[in-house]
Structures are given as C-alpha cells and as structure tokens.
Image (spheres, rainbow, N blue to C red):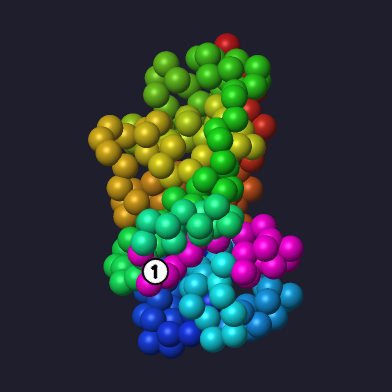
Amino acid sequence: MHKATVLTVDDDENLQIVMRQYLEQNGYQFISAMSGAELMSKLDVAHPDIILLDLNLPDQDGLSLLTAIRSKSKAPVIVVSGKNETADRIVGLEMGADDYLTKPFEMRELSARIKAVLRRSASTEKPAASEAESSLGKAKRLSFSGWVLDRMQYQLFDAEGKPADLTSGEFKLLEALVVAPNRVLSREQLFELTRQGEFDVYDRVIDIQIARIRKKLSDDPQNPSLIKTVRGVGYMFCGEAKVLD
C-alpha cells in the first residue's frame, strides 16, 4: 500500500539518512533537500503530500520559506527544529506551519505527527452526512455492484444469493464505507466505527481487513474499483450504493 510523499529540507545529512530509512521502510516516498534553494527547485517538479522544514538552513531562515512554499504547494508543513522555546513554536505556527516538532525526536513520533497532519489537511472536518448517506445508514439492506449488504443477517451476498462469509469485523468495516460513499474515511475514523478501544496509529488491522474484503469482492488490489486507497489518509468506497429496504 502506498503512503504519502514526504519532502524534507534539512542540512543535517545524518538525520536525512535516518529519516529516509525509517519512512521508506514504512512505505513513504521520500524526497530530500539540503537548502532553501534546493527545496524551491524540488517544488517545481515534485508534488509532495507533506513537507518537513528545518529552521536553521545554510542559505536562509526556514520561517521565511513558509510564504514561498505556499506559493508553490498546498502541502502541509511540519517545522522540525532544535529551537524548543515556546515563543519559537508560537511564531512557527502563526507563520503558517501545521505542526512543530523539536529535535531530537523519535522516528515513531515523527511518523505519528505526519499521519495526524495528513488526516487534518486531507479530510479536515468530517462533513455532515447528506440525505443520501442518512437513508443509506437507516436501510436494512443495501445493494452495490451486484452485491447485497444485509444488515439484519450481518452478511454480504452475491447476485446468486451466496454469502461472501465476511467476519464480523470485515462486515462492520465494509458497512462503514458503503454508507458513506465517495467520502474518505481515515483509519482512525474506521477504527472508531468498527472496533472498541483506543486507536493506535501503528495498528494495521484496518489495512489487513481491507485487503481481505477486496479479495472477497474480487476487487483488484493493484487497481481497486470499489474501495480506493487515499494515500496517507485512509479509504473511500467508490461504488454506487442503493437502498433495497
């Protein structure tokens, strides 16, 4: 599964190496720049999903780059800096940064911050359910692409009435996606809708269940048509759901 493209600008080569190794191992695309000028050059050709910005660059102050970045990219920016004073954080956020992470930091925290910022920027506020979504949410049975989702029997049936043998977890996950068609649901939202307990950003159960559901729906995992992956955010059901009763 593909994740977000991260563009990081930092003149600490060793830190760049560590971040690259960790983030690429976790599925991210990684682009690096060592100066402000190189960053702006990279933005002419690259389209990152998120930017990690150091403040102490060899050619200019990182904060002065925020306005220039916004002129070329809508990607959210996380300031990554050794400056840990409260005033520095406030200035960074007031200048337009989406988050502020002080050095030194753990890679797991960096990954968690990236995920949180991407969730906020991509889906921002959860939109209010439309009338169509409301009717789907109240239906006992729904149909889509030759399948029938029976919410009374807690099962999915094909066109010939044969069950797909979904587990209860798989059913809840598919149900959550189908009743919110064409709307991106983050992993955290899906976790809250389908599982009890506190969300863990490192829990891959949602991704595993999505893979199993796609297999049972014969939805090509390399080019899925029903359940799309939205990089770095979550999943979206792209089929047309209809109320049966």
88 up-or-down from 186: above or below: below
**What percent of the width, then of the height, locates residue 116?**
44, 50
> Does the image show residue 198?
yes
What percent of the width, then of the height, locates residue 102? 36, 65
Residue 74 among magenta residues: yes
Point out the stretch of residues depicted in magenta: 64-84
The picture places residue 63, in percent across and down from the top left corner, at 57, 67
Q: Quarter of the image for the C terminus: give it.
A: top right
Q: Quadrant of residue 45?
A: bottom right
Secondary element under disc 1, as helix, strand or loop, is loop
Q: Nearer the viewer, residue 244 or 233?
A: 233
Q: Residue furthest front?
A: 87
Above or below residue 218? Residue 178 is: above
In reply to whether residue 12 is colored magenta, the answer given is: no
Q: On screen, 53 above or below 199?
A: below
Q: Can residue 227 be seen?
A: no
Name the kind of residue labelled 1 in the image. Lys
**Which residue lies at the image location 55% right of the left edge and 52% below the top edge?**
94
- The structure residue drawn at horizontal position 56% and vertical position 75%, both measured from the top left corner, is 61
**201 displayed left or right of 228:** left
Residue drawn at x 50%, y 68% as measured from the top left: 52
Q: Which residue is mark 1?
A: 83
Residue 31 is left or right of residue 190, and the answer is right
